[in-house]
Amino acid sequence: MTDILIVEDEQAILESLEFILTRCGWSVGVARDGEAALQAALRFQPRLVLLDIMLPKRGGLDVLKILRSNAALASTPVLILTARGQQYDRQAAMDLKADGFITKPYANGEVVDAVRRILDSRPRPAASRAHA
């Protein structure tokens, strides 16, 4: 099981997030577009998805809607990381039951704190605990 699935199409941001989160001890999977995100979520069964809104092939809000409608993934926490910080975007994400919303640019510590808060608030799956 992967701890965190990062869904981000900007290479520099993706690499930065992957580096930071891996250094914190989490296992990380990546996807660079909305279609790949859905496939990766099913394959990795992550404990958390970090999701950009503006993605190629399928937008992040559409990905979130599909995740919430999939029985196997509906309860997976999703943290939105996006440059689209308008109230409309935030409300749309919250209406789809996003677990958090961070606007770019952000401090790395802000992301780590949000990830830690979300993951610490949920029990760790048995398979993941066995390897911890």
Image: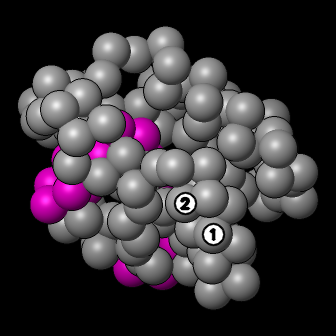
Dot 1 and dot 2 residues touching (CB under 8 Å): yes
Q: Is residue 109 visible?
A: yes
Q: Residue at x 71, y 84 (%)?
A: 12
Location of residue 77 in the rendering, given as x and y in whole percent from the top left corner: 42, 31
Q: Quadrant where the C terminus lies?
A: top left
Q: In the rendered structure, does residue 117 fall within the stretch colored magenta?
A: no
60 vs 117, left or right, is left
- Pick whichever, 89 or 5, lies toward us: 5
Q: Residues within 10 Å of mark 2 (few under 14, many from 20)?
A: some
Q: Residue at x 22, y 40 (%)?
A: 131
Q: Is residue 96 visible?
A: no
Q: Residue at x 49, y 13 (%)?
A: 121
Q: Residues within 10 Å of mark 1 (few under 14, many from 20)?
A: few
| Element type at mark 2 | helix
**Range of residues picked out in magenta:** 41-57
The residue carrying mark 1 is: 19
Image vertical order of residue 72 relative to residue 37, above or below: above
Q: Which mark is residue 22?
A: 2
113 vs 43, left or right, is right
Q: Amino acid at mark 1?
A: Phe
| Element type at mark 1 | helix
Q: Residue at x 72, y 44 (%)?
A: 111
52 vs 12, left or right, is left
Location of residue 64 in the rendering, given as x and y in whole percent from the top left corner: 39, 45
Q: Which mark is residue 79?
A: none
